[in-house]
Image: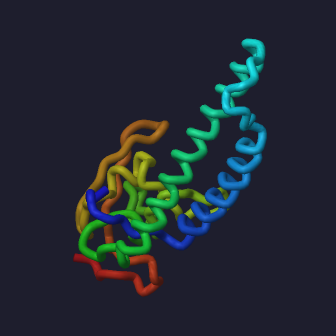
Protein backbone atom coordinates (compact mmCIF):
# COMPACT_ATOMS: atom_id res chain seq x y z
CA UNK A 1 0.00 0.00 0.00
CA UNK A 2 1.10 3.58 -0.49
CA UNK A 3 1.14 4.78 3.11
CA UNK A 4 -1.43 7.48 2.32
CA UNK A 5 -5.19 7.14 2.33
CA UNK A 6 -6.14 4.18 0.14
CA UNK A 7 -9.25 4.23 -2.06
CA UNK A 8 -12.04 1.88 -1.06
CA UNK A 9 -13.96 -0.07 -3.68
CA UNK A 10 -17.75 -0.20 -3.56
CA UNK A 11 -17.59 -3.93 -2.82
CA UNK A 12 -15.22 -3.36 0.12
CA UNK A 13 -17.29 -0.42 1.41
CA UNK A 14 -20.44 -2.58 1.40
CA UNK A 15 -18.65 -5.50 3.08
CA UNK A 16 -17.16 -3.24 5.77
CA UNK A 17 -20.54 -1.58 6.37
CA UNK A 18 -22.21 -5.00 6.80
CA UNK A 19 -19.45 -6.20 9.11
CA UNK A 20 -19.67 -3.00 11.16
CA UNK A 21 -23.42 -3.45 11.68
CA UNK A 22 -22.90 -7.09 12.70
CA UNK A 23 -20.11 -6.15 15.12
CA UNK A 24 -22.19 -3.43 16.75
CA UNK A 25 -25.06 -5.89 17.25
CA UNK A 26 -22.69 -8.48 18.71
CA UNK A 27 -21.14 -5.85 20.98
CA UNK A 28 -24.57 -4.87 22.35
CA UNK A 29 -25.34 -8.52 23.04
CA UNK A 30 -22.08 -9.03 24.95
CA UNK A 31 -22.29 -5.70 26.78
CA UNK A 32 -25.71 -6.43 28.33
CA UNK A 33 -24.33 -9.62 29.87
CA UNK A 34 -21.76 -7.74 31.94
CA UNK A 35 -22.69 -7.08 35.53
CA UNK A 36 -22.87 -3.49 36.65
CA UNK A 37 -22.32 -4.30 40.29
CA UNK A 38 -19.49 -1.89 41.02
CA UNK A 39 -17.48 -4.73 42.49
CA UNK A 40 -19.84 -5.23 45.47
CA UNK A 41 -20.58 -8.86 44.65
CA UNK A 42 -17.95 -11.46 45.03
CA UNK A 43 -18.55 -14.40 42.75
CA UNK A 44 -16.70 -17.63 42.44
CA UNK A 45 -13.67 -17.93 40.19
CA UNK A 46 -15.76 -19.31 37.32
CA UNK A 47 -17.98 -16.22 37.42
CA UNK A 48 -14.94 -13.97 37.48
CA UNK A 49 -13.32 -15.85 34.59
CA UNK A 50 -16.53 -15.63 32.58
CA UNK A 51 -16.78 -11.90 33.26
CA UNK A 52 -13.14 -11.40 32.25
CA UNK A 53 -13.76 -13.33 29.02
CA UNK A 54 -16.71 -11.08 28.14
CA UNK A 55 -14.61 -7.96 28.86
CA UNK A 56 -11.87 -9.33 26.59
CA UNK A 57 -14.46 -10.01 23.87
CA UNK A 58 -15.77 -6.43 24.19
CA UNK A 59 -12.23 -5.12 23.78
CA UNK A 60 -11.74 -7.25 20.65
CA UNK A 61 -15.05 -6.05 19.19
CA UNK A 62 -14.26 -2.41 20.03
CA UNK A 63 -10.86 -2.67 18.35
CA UNK A 64 -12.34 -4.14 15.16
CA UNK A 65 -15.14 -1.55 15.12
CA UNK A 66 -12.53 1.23 15.43
CA UNK A 67 -10.45 -0.31 12.62
CA UNK A 68 -13.43 -0.51 10.26
CA UNK A 69 -14.65 2.99 11.07
CA UNK A 70 -11.14 4.34 10.41
CA UNK A 71 -10.89 2.46 7.12
CA UNK A 72 -14.28 3.75 5.97
CA UNK A 73 -13.24 7.34 6.81
CA UNK A 74 -9.91 6.88 5.02
CA UNK A 75 -11.61 5.45 1.95
CA UNK A 76 -14.01 8.39 1.85
CA UNK A 77 -11.18 10.95 1.68
CA UNK A 78 -8.79 8.98 -0.53
CA UNK A 79 -10.43 9.83 -3.82
CA UNK A 80 -10.29 7.59 -6.87
CA UNK A 81 -7.52 5.02 -7.37
CA UNK A 82 -4.39 6.13 -9.17
CA UNK A 83 -4.18 5.42 -12.88
CA UNK A 84 -0.37 5.63 -12.76
CA UNK A 85 0.48 2.86 -10.32
CA UNK A 86 -1.49 -0.13 -9.09
CA UNK A 87 -3.13 0.23 -5.69
CA UNK A 88 -6.27 -0.78 -3.86
CA UNK A 89 -9.24 -0.04 -6.10
CA UNK A 90 -7.26 -0.29 -9.35
CA UNK A 91 -8.57 -2.28 -12.29
CA UNK A 92 -5.74 -4.09 -14.02
CA UNK A 93 -5.59 -6.04 -17.29
CA UNK A 94 -2.96 -8.77 -17.20
CA UNK A 95 -1.44 -11.24 -19.63
CA UNK A 96 -0.31 -14.45 -17.97
CA UNK A 97 2.51 -16.75 -19.13
CA UNK A 98 0.00 -18.98 -20.97
CA UNK A 99 -1.05 -15.90 -23.07
CA UNK A 100 -4.43 -15.75 -21.30
CA UNK A 101 -5.59 -12.20 -20.51
CA UNK A 102 -7.78 -11.18 -17.59
CA UNK A 103 -9.00 -7.96 -16.03
CA UNK A 104 -9.07 -7.90 -12.24
CA UNK A 105 -9.75 -5.34 -9.55
CA UNK A 106 -7.46 -4.98 -6.55
CA UNK A 107 -9.54 -4.91 -3.40
CA UNK A 108 -9.42 -5.43 0.33
CA UNK A 109 -12.36 -7.76 0.62
CA UNK A 110 -13.04 -10.59 -1.80
CA UNK A 111 -16.62 -11.53 -2.44
CA UNK A 112 -17.00 -15.29 -2.78
CA UNK A 113 -18.75 -15.01 -6.16
CA UNK A 114 -16.55 -12.24 -7.59
CA UNK A 115 -13.92 -13.99 -9.70
CA UNK A 116 -12.52 -10.63 -10.88
CA UNK A 117 -11.52 -9.46 -7.39
CA UNK A 118 -7.93 -9.96 -6.25
CA UNK A 119 -7.24 -8.97 -2.67
CA UNK A 120 -4.29 -6.72 -1.96
CA UNK A 121 -2.89 -9.25 0.49
CA UNK A 122 -3.02 -12.22 -1.92
CA UNK A 123 0.22 -13.26 -3.64
CA UNK A 124 -0.86 -11.72 -6.98
CA UNK A 125 -2.27 -8.61 -5.29
CA UNK A 126 0.92 -7.99 -3.30
CA UNK A 127 3.01 -8.48 -6.44
CA UNK A 128 0.93 -5.96 -8.40
CA UNK A 129 0.86 -3.13 -5.84
CA UNK A 130 2.99 -0.18 -6.92
CA UNK A 131 3.59 -1.46 -10.46
CA UNK A 132 2.69 0.24 -13.75
CA UNK A 133 1.45 -0.76 -17.18
CA UNK A 134 4.23 -2.63 -19.00
CA UNK A 135 5.73 -4.14 -15.83
CA UNK A 136 6.13 -7.88 -15.37
CA UNK A 137 5.36 -9.22 -11.90
CA UNK A 138 6.27 -12.54 -10.34
CA UNK A 139 4.13 -14.13 -7.63
CA UNK A 140 3.80 -17.47 -5.88
CA UNK A 141 1.10 -20.01 -6.70
CA UNK A 142 0.51 -23.50 -5.29
CA UNK A 143 2.17 -24.80 -8.49
CA UNK A 144 5.24 -22.59 -8.06
CA UNK A 145 6.26 -19.11 -9.22
CA UNK A 146 4.19 -17.46 -11.96
CA UNK A 147 4.48 -14.24 -13.95
CA UNK A 148 2.08 -11.76 -15.46
CA UNK A 149 2.53 -8.64 -17.58
CA UNK A 150 0.48 -5.56 -16.68
CA UNK A 151 -1.17 -4.54 -19.95
CA UNK A 152 -3.25 -1.64 -18.68
CA UNK A 153 -4.35 0.05 -15.52
CA UNK A 154 -7.65 1.77 -14.85
CA UNK A 155 -9.58 3.11 -11.89
CA UNK A 156 -12.41 0.61 -11.79
CA UNK A 157 -14.96 2.80 -13.57
CA UNK A 158 -15.15 0.55 -16.60
CA UNK A 159 -13.44 2.94 -19.03
CA UNK A 160 -10.36 0.75 -19.33
CA UNK A 161 -8.04 3.29 -17.75
CA UNK A 162 -4.71 3.94 -19.37
CA UNK A 163 -3.85 2.36 -22.68
CA UNK A 164 -0.86 0.06 -22.95
CA UNK A 165 2.40 1.87 -22.42
Judge from the rendering whether residue 31 lies leftward or rightward of residue 76; answer left or right.
right
Say whether residue 109 is visible: yes
> Looking at the figure, which quarter contains the C terminus?
bottom left
Asked which quadrant contains residue 56, the reply is top right
Asked which quadrant contains residue 92, the reply is bottom left
Percent x, y of residue 51: 70, 27
Q: Residue at x 57, y 39 (%)?
A: 60
Q: Residue at x 29, y 53 (%)?
A: 137
Judge from the rendering whether residue 49 lies leftward or rightward of residue 66; answer left or right.
right
Say whether residue 92 is visible: no
Asked which quadrant contains residue 128, the reply is bottom left
Percent x, y of residue 138: 31, 48
Nearer the observer, 143 or 122: 122
Q: Residue furthest bottom?
A: 159
The answer to whether residue 72 is above or below residue 142 is below
Judge from the rendering whether residue 91 lies leftward or rightward of residue 20; answer left or right.
left
Amino acid sequence: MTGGPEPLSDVAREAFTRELADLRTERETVAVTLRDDGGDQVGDRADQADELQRVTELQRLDARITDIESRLREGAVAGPPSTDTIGVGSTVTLRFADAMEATVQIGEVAEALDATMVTADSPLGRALLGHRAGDTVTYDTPGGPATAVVLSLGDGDGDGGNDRS
